[in-house]
Amino acid sequence: MLSGMTTPRVIIVPGLGDSGPEHWQSLWTEKYGAARVRQDDPETPTPATWSARLQEVVDATPGDVVLVGHSCGVLNIVHWAKLYPVPDRVRGAMLVGPTDPEQLDMNAKAPAVLAMGPMPMTPLPFPVLVVASENDPYAAFDRAEAFADAWDATLVTAGEAGHINIASGHGDWPEGEVLLAECLDAWKRE
């Protein structure tokens, strides 16, 4: 499906808690030799600090790259694209389970996410695939549709897949690997 060393190179952008060791993002980091954004404080996101760390990882990763964000990592990527000039070698982003910092009950569910609001709703300067669940507790599907629309992204439904994380049964996520392989193939330089 994917080789151990992909071209373009994958950069994993985790959400809150750094996506634990059994999360598909952690499994992909090892399986594909991906670069990974490790925040100093993975429990307390802010657009400025998390974007600065993403910029450091992009700068340190040679060649063309594809960003793979999950949950609050999606927020990290969209804020970064607003705050920093995006190099041409960023070939695209796969944004999985975007979390909605403006969701009315977010303070009760994940109050740290509130610091990442408001959600940037402008086109992203690279191709984007948004993978959203129809029953994600952290973002209503119609909001995920609105995000994809605002970012000029392609939207793929994961069906009723919860938050596409360990809690929803997505440690190993083979369907996601298929989507990633398609993205890498579509976004590589000819």
Image: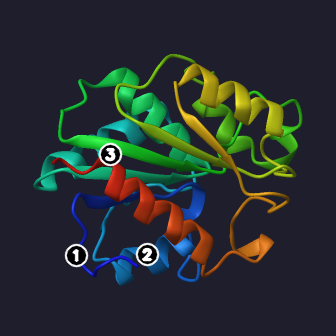
36, above or below 111, in the image: below
Front position among marks 1 and 2: 1
Q: Write down the quadrant of residue 92 in the picture.
A: top left
Q: Nearer the viewer, mark 2 or mark 3?
A: 2
Q: Which image quadrant for residue 145?
A: top right
- Neighbours of disc 1 within 10 Å: few (<14), some (14-19), many (20+): few
Residue 146 is marked as none
- Name the residue located 28 percent from the left edge and 25 percent from the top edge: 84
Write the residue at 62% across / 23% down: 149
As drawn, the residue found furthest toward the front would be 190
**Residue occupied by mark 1:** 5
Callout 3 crowding tier (Cα within 10 Å): few <14, some 14–19, many ≥20: many
> Where residue 50 appears, x then y in whole percent?
41, 42
Q: What residue type is labelled 1?
A: Met
Q: What element carries label 2?
A: helix
Question: Can I make out residue 12 in this image?
Answer: yes
**Amino acid type at mark 3:** Leu
Please state which of residues 114 and 58 is positioned toward the viewer in this rendering. Answer: 58
| Rendering coords of residue 126 (x, y %) | 35, 32
Tell me the residue that label 3 is attached to: 54
Separation of disc 3 and disc 1 at Cα? 20 Å
Residue 28, which numbered label? 2
Amino acid type of disc 2?
Trp
Describe residue 8's horizontal placement relative to residue 60 as left or right. Answer: right
Identify the residue shown where x is 53% and y is 32%: 153
Q: In this view, does 113 lie to the left or right of 1?
A: right
